[in-house]
Image: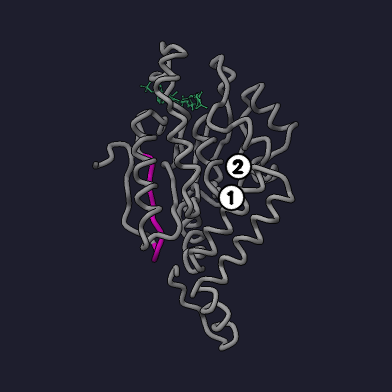
Amino acid sequence: MQPEFLIIHPPPAQYVAHVQLHRPAALNALNLQLMAELRHTLRLLDADDQVRAIVINGDEQAFAAGADIKQMSGKSAIDRYNTDQFSTWDTIRRIKKPLIAAVSGFALGGGCELAMLCDLIVASETARFGQPEIKLGIMPAAGGTQRLTRAVGKALAMEMVLTGRQLSAAEALQAGLINKIVPVALYLQEAIKLAATMATMSPLAVQMDKEAVLKSFDTTLDECLQFEQKNFYLLFATADQQEGMQAFVEKRKPVFKGR
Ligand code: CAA
């Protein structure tokens, strides 16, 4: 299936994939088709040995201005229930490879939630983050109340969710929502650079690290520590672990193969 609302760019660096949300006339609003295309694409990339990290951006004006309000308006609760749109988000949540959001302009509502679903966020100086659903008489539903609170803490999350206030890139950085801010001309390049660095590491170690960090949001410290140890032991079953340590001893760069 050729996506209508995504551009899948040629790899910008070795083992790095770049997917662009492309619905510029609607500030990349996340309609159901766009989200289905994104799910399908990310699943393919997750299964592709030639991909070790994935960058997702929108354009300079908007990462995404939220779920598609026009598509949602007039729908009943049962329509929404039958559509089951959040199963798409659940699938994206289970992508094993690191996802890096490159955000410029608006990341609002579902757009902010999609950025937060990614593992790292690189923002341009113009980026704005917000959960404005309250202004529509609804609330975030793709993880916004949960991931935002975990990232920025209760006080700021309450303010954003209950008033719809947007954060500038500088505020988002200070609050711990994003990783870095760069000039607009460089935001995508910087995200690709981060992805390329991860792509030089052992892909299995990267995936198990991601899994273990995300686990910390789900359960108790005790369980998370056990999970971390399990993944640590598992990595000693890989050739990449032997290669990584051998390369250190031999004072050379490791060549990781994902085995
Ligand atoms: N859904 C559908 N269309 C959208 C949209 C959205 N979320 N956001 C923007 N658009 C469309 C506009 O309707 C407009 O289309 P037309 O030219 O056909 O009228 C086009 O994109 C450009 O938008 P604006 O003219 O509004 O641009 P602006 O620069 O004046 O304002 C904005 C930008 C402040 C982002 C404003 O567009 C806006 O407030 N958008 C809605 C943001 C929002 O409420 N997002 C939350 C959605 S609900 C959600 O996401 C639920 C969830 O958790 C899953």
Sequence-first tag of 2 and 1? 2
Instruction: Find out whether the residues at labels 2 and 1 contact each other: C-beta distance under 8 Å.
Output: yes
On residue 94, the disc is none
Q: Which residue is mark 2?
A: 169
Locate residue 145 relative to residue 110 in the image: left or right. Answer: right
Relative to 209, does residue 32 appear above or below in the rendering?
Answer: above
Q: CA distance from mark 2 to mark 1?
A: 7 Å
- Quarter of the rendering occupied by the N terminus: top left
In-front residue for pair 45/198:
45
Please give the name of the residue rendered at 38% of the width and 45% of the height, measured from the top-left corner: 20
Q: Position of residue 66 (x, y in %)?
A: 48, 29
In-front residue for pair 185/10:
10
Magenta segment, prevailing SS (helix, strand or loop): strand
Residue stretch rendered in magenta on the structure: 13-21
Dot 2 alpha-carbon crowd within 10 angstroms: few under 14, some 14 to 19, many 20 or more: many
Please give the name of the residue rendered at 53% of the width and 85% of the height, measured from the top-left corner: 252
Q: Position of residue 122 (x, y in %)?
A: 54, 50
Q: Which residue is mark 1?
A: 181
Relative to 24, does residue 80 appear above or below in the rendering?
Answer: above
Q: Is residue 17 magenta?
A: yes
Q: Is residue 53 magenta?
A: no
